[in-house]
Image: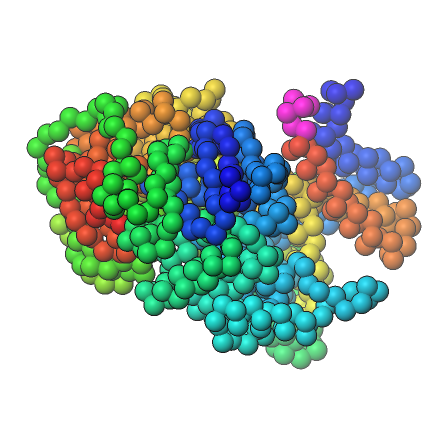
């Protein structure tokens, strides 16, 4: 009994993932196509911006401005991309993402604004700026060369998957194997000790928010390529979705723990769950509630795991 | 024994195995000012916290007005009639004086709606303030008040409970001379109305003015009760120190090397005009009471606090600005007083903590090789005798002494030339203390320079080549190893 409980607590995320898959597969007509669709098309987008959130959470903060950064940077870049200046457009998009991230980072470290307030406030400011910039218009009908980034596939696997996993690999390397990555974790775990050990904690935090901004722009760009349309409303729910995926994945809001690897599982649980609710024809009115429940329950399970770690010999 | 209001019998207390109070017996008489003195860490505050219900005692009994009482919470102590004014005030800055005085027991208008009777609060607070001779509107917000006035609010709070025993922990530490005189007037007034005051202070000169009886604590024991008429300040100091300097400090004294650390008229928030220097192969001590500015000096040298005046010279080069990054690059290391919050990352492993400072230098390409990291961490763990099953154990699971060794290992691993130790042995058991002294001695043997802050005088005298005394943010004296005695140092500190 003890062993079963221990196993269940230790692998509850994987168990949850399979449980959702089994339920959704049992009611869909073509389960393979359904799963393929989720992993190839839906998950990569969510993953990329959730990674940004996860990194911010590891430093002990969070980044609620992801969605508006994605909207602002892609809309600005769309003006160039529509003129077939694809590479310049992409570069501008990522630079704007980094710049807005820098602004977040400066607010948090130098002006010492609480990360929640800083990024939440910035979210409104940036979103407002996109509305003004776009004035209700949309930019669409991009060239094939641009759209292929998100639409194309190689060896039967969507480009999105390659991009998401390339980013995952880079982030895993940087955050697990380099001095910078180590300093991000130590800053999140205890900023005072880290500073008193000579870590430039301000710089660490600023760079993390810049990376977060770049990731938001990247996912925004892929959305625009996929939907063939840049608009001011893009990414309205990025921030909260990313936070949900991060928390479900098991990265602690206290900072210093977790990682982008955990978030992959968090994103998969989230995407599978949304899909499952759709195929089960659960009313959209209920979907939010179920979704929230999963966040709360996964937090409780995470706590139980820590509390009974010794008892269950995990 | 009719006039005894509070009697303390055989009280003992230890924190994680380290005894802080042993077998304390004391009786407080009705309407007397009973002063308790002792060095830092002698156990005064712990004793007061037991009496006022903040801590639980391990052993012993309390008698209030002849009857045994169990005080297991602050609320209980207040109901019995014991109030305490802590060194740090417990006031809500954005509430009014009246709201603070009646916090948690606001009078209500009717039992049904439980509406707070603000008029009554105002009226009663005004009476209390008048009694204390304070002409302030009780509706004033506390953050608008000066320190002395805030203290009066604390006194009013205690009076409002009709406390028969009022404990004051270092009440004059932050007051000016004039405010102190005022406080003493109030103490005398309270005394004349039958309130007993337990008064803790470091300032020996003011004790003479206010005390009736005096108890000296040292290392958690009572070393003497005196009536104030026949006590001299010299005698009190002698009783406060008294401990023999044992032979656990294995120092060997050599010629010193060049000067590596020097401050020139250094000034910052809590201190000014500090001129000290440290040579290679030398341990230099900073002595002073809590709050004298010792830790602030250390943190300013290390770049955590900003330099406001003067400069810090490292290896002969002058710096007017310092940061922790610059300091660590210059191979300065700080072993802070609060090792749980500032010394080591409790939630990370021994390995992560040991290599933390050396990372950028060890891995120039920025890519961490786990093998090298493991080898380095294991080497220092063995060298310092950190007792743990593996380098991957979380630091929070270690004992205090081993945690401290992890912090020291971090700086040794980073090959620091100048080390600042702030209370390196506080809260550490005797065995680990000796080990830490051993490590420090070896470091100076190897030509490192050490600046050491400690409240433990025998330790300071046993370890240091020279000792500076700090009082109110100023260096008051400098003693060489041969001149230093506990009496002389303490006299320069108080």
Q: Is residue B16 visible?
A: yes
Percent of width and height locating residue B447? 16, 33
Q: Is residue A216 left or right of residue B406?
A: right
Q: Residue B100, relative to residue A79: is it above or below?
A: above
Percent of width and height locating residue A95? 50, 63
Q: Nearer the viewer, residue B20 or B217?
A: B217
Q: Nearer the viewer, residue A7 or A149?
A: A7
Residue ranking furthest to the left? B255
Quarter of the image for the C terminus of chain A: give it. Answer: top right
Residue positioned 37% across, 63% down in the render: B180
Number of marks in the rendered image:
0
Percent of width and height locating residue A99? 49, 64
Q: Is residue B451 left or right of residue A243?
A: left
Q: Nearer the viewer, residue A150 or B110?
A: B110
Quarter of the image for the N terminus of chain A: give it. Answer: top right
The secondary structure that most of the magenta stretch takes on is loop
Residue positioned 22% across, 46% down in the render: B491
- Which region of the structure is painted magenta? A308-313
Q: Residue A157, relative to residue A235: is it above or below?
A: above
Q: Nearer the viewer, residue A145 or A45?
A: A45
Residue positioned 61% across, 38% down in the render: B67
Residue ranking furthest to the front? B2
Q: Is residue A16 left or right of residue B425?
A: right
Q: Was residue A208 drawn as part of the magenta stretch in this picture?
A: no
Residue positioned 65% across, 75% down in the render: A131
Percent of width and height locating residue A167? 56, 46
């Amino acid at each position: 009994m003890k062993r079963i409980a221990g196993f269940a607590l230790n692998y509850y995320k994987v168990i949850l993932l399979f449980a959702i898959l089994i339920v959704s597969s049992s009611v869909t007509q073509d389960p393979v196509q359904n799963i393929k669709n989720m992993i190839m098309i839906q998950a990569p987008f969510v993953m990329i911006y959730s990674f940004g959130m996860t990194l911010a959470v590891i430093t002990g903060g969070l980044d609620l401005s992801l969605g508006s950064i994605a909207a602002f940077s892609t809309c600005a870049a769309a003006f160039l991309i529509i003129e077939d200046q694809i590479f310049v457009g992409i570069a501008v998009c990522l630079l704007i993402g980094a710049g807005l991230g820098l602004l977040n980072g400066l607010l948090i470290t130098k002006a010492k604004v609480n990360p929640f307030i800083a990024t939440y406030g910035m979210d409104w400011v940036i979103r407002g700026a996109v509305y003004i910039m776009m004035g209700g218009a949309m930019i669409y009908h991009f060239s094939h060369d641009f759209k292929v980034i998100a639409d194309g596939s190689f060896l039967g696997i969507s480009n999105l998957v390659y991009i998401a996993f390339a980013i995952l690999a880079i982030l895993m390397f940087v955050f697990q194997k380099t001095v910078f990555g180590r300093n991000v974790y130590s800053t999140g775990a205890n900023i005072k000790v880290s500073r008193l050990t000579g870590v430039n904690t301000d710089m660490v935090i600023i760079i993390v928010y810049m990376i977060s901004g770049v990731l938001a722009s990247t996912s925004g760009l892929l959305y625009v390529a996929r939907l063939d349309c840049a608009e001011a409303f893009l990414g309205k729910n990025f921030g909260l979705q990313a936070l949900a995926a991060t928390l479900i994945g098991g990265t602690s809001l206290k900072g210093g723990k977790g990682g982008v690897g955990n978030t992959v599982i968090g994103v998969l649980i989230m995407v599978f769950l949304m899909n499952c609710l759709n195929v089960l024809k659960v009313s959209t009115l209920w979907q939010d509630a179920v979704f929230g429940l999963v966040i709360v329950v996964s937090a409780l399970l995470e706590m139980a795991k820590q509390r009974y770690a010794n008892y269950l010999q995990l | 024994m009719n006039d005894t209001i509070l009697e303390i019998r055989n009280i003992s207390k230890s924190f994680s195995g380290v005894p802080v109070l042993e077998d304390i017996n004391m009786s407080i008489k009705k309407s007397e000012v009973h002063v308790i003195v002792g060095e830092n860490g002698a156990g005064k505050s712990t004793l007061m916290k037991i009496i006022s219900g903040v801590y639980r005692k391990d052993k012993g009994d309390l008698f209030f007005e002849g009857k045994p009482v169990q005080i297991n919470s602050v609320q209980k102590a207040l109901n019995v009639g014991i109030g305490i004014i802590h060194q740090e005030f417990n006031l809500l800055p954005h509430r009014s004086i009246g709201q603070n005085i009646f916090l948690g027991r606001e009078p209500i208008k009717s039992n049904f709606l439980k509406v707070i009777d603000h008029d009554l609060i105002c009226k009663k607070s005004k009476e209390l303030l008048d009694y204390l001779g304070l002409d302030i509107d009780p509706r004033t917000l506390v953050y608008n008040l000066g320190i002395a006035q805030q203290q009066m609010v604390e006194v009013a709070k205690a009076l409002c409970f009709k406390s028969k025993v009022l404990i004051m922990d270092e009440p004059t530490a932050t007051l000016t001379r004039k405010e102190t005189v005022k406080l003493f007037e109030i103490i005398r007034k309270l005394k004349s109305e039958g309130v007993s005051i337990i008064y803790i202070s470091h300032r020996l000169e003011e004790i003479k003015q206010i005390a009736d009886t005096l108890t000296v604590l040292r290392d958690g024991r009572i070393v003497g009760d005196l009536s104030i008429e026949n006590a001299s300040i010299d005698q009190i100091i002698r009783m406060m120190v008294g401990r023999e300097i044992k032979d656990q400090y294995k120092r060997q004294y050599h010629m010193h090397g060049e000067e590596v650390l020097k401050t020139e008229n250094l000034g910052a928030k809590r201190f000014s005009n500090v001129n000290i220097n440290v040579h290679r192969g030398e341990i230099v001590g900073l002595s002073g009471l809590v709050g004298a500015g010792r830790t602030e000096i250390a943190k300013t040298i290390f770049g955590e606090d900003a330099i406001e005046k003067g400069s810090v010279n490292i290896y002969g080069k002058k710096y007017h600005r310092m940061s922790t990054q610059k300091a660590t690059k210059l191979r300065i290391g700080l072993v802070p007083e609060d090792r749980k919050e500032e010394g080591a990352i409790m939630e990370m492993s021994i390995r992560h903590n040991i290599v933390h400072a050396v990372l950028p230098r060890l891995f120039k390409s920025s890519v961490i090789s786990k093998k090298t990291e493991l080898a380095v961490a294991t080497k220092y763990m063995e060298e310092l005798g950190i007792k743990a099953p593996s380098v991957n154990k979380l630091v929070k699971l270690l004992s205090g002494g081993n945690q401290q060794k992890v912090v020291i290992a971090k700086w040794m691993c980073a090959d620091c030339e100048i080390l600042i130790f702030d209370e390196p042995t506080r809260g550490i058991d005797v065995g680990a203390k000796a080990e830490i002294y051993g490590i420090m001695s070896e470091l100076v043997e190897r030509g490192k320079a050490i600046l050491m802050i400690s409240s433990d005088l025998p330790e300071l005298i046993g370890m240091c080549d020279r000792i500076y005394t700090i009082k109110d943010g100023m260096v008051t004296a400098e003693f060489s190893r041969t001149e230093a005695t506990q009496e002389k140092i303490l006299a320069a500190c108080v």
